[in-house]
Amino acid sequence: MEIFREFTFESAHRLPNVPEGHKCARLHGHSYRLTVTVGGPIDDRLGWVMDFGDLKTAVEPLVRSLDHRALNEVEGLENPTSENLAIWIWDRLSPDIQGLRSVRVRETATSGCTYYGPI
């Protein structure tokens, strides 16, 4: 069984390694949508995989650290592609969230990525 919780944050970034003239080389912003998915057995007594409130408590400090920031200025996000951002988030959440299954980062309503952890 899997559960998920969605979070949003507003951040700016530019992609330093794209070809000259690429529009993403310029500083621009996104309304990011983050989905954190946790999986495991349903607790017989409680009837859930994890308390949604506990998931929120674990993720919100990380979201606050990204909200209204220039992502390129965040240590470890010098090249803040969606892929690198998803890995960065996973690396910070996985020690504290048992059963973390995926981190999905959406830059726009139609573009994003899902990271399932290191292979």
Image (cartoon, grey):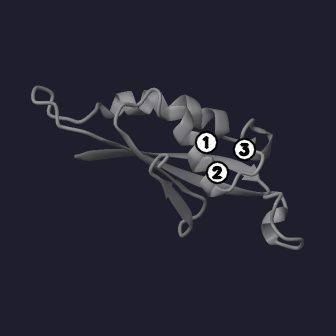
Cβ atoms under marks 1 and 2 closer than 8 Å:
yes
Residue at the far left: name it: 44
Image x and y of residue 96, in percent: 45, 26
Residue type at mark 3? Leu
- The residue drawn where x is 88% and y is 73% is 21
Residue under label 2, please give it. Answer: 84
**Horizontal side, residue 118 vs residue 43: left or right:** right
- The residue drawn where x is 27% and y is 46% is 2
Image x and y of residue 104, in percent: 48, 53
Q: Nearer the viewer, residue 45 or 81?
A: 81
Image x and y of residue 42, in percent: 17, 36
Residue under label 1, please give it. Answer: 88
Question: Is 78 rendered above or below residue 28?
Answer: above
> What is the CA distance from the residue labelled 3 to the residue labelled 1?
8 Å
Cβ atoms under marks 3 and 1 closer than 8 Å:
yes
Q: Secondary structure at mark 1?
A: helix
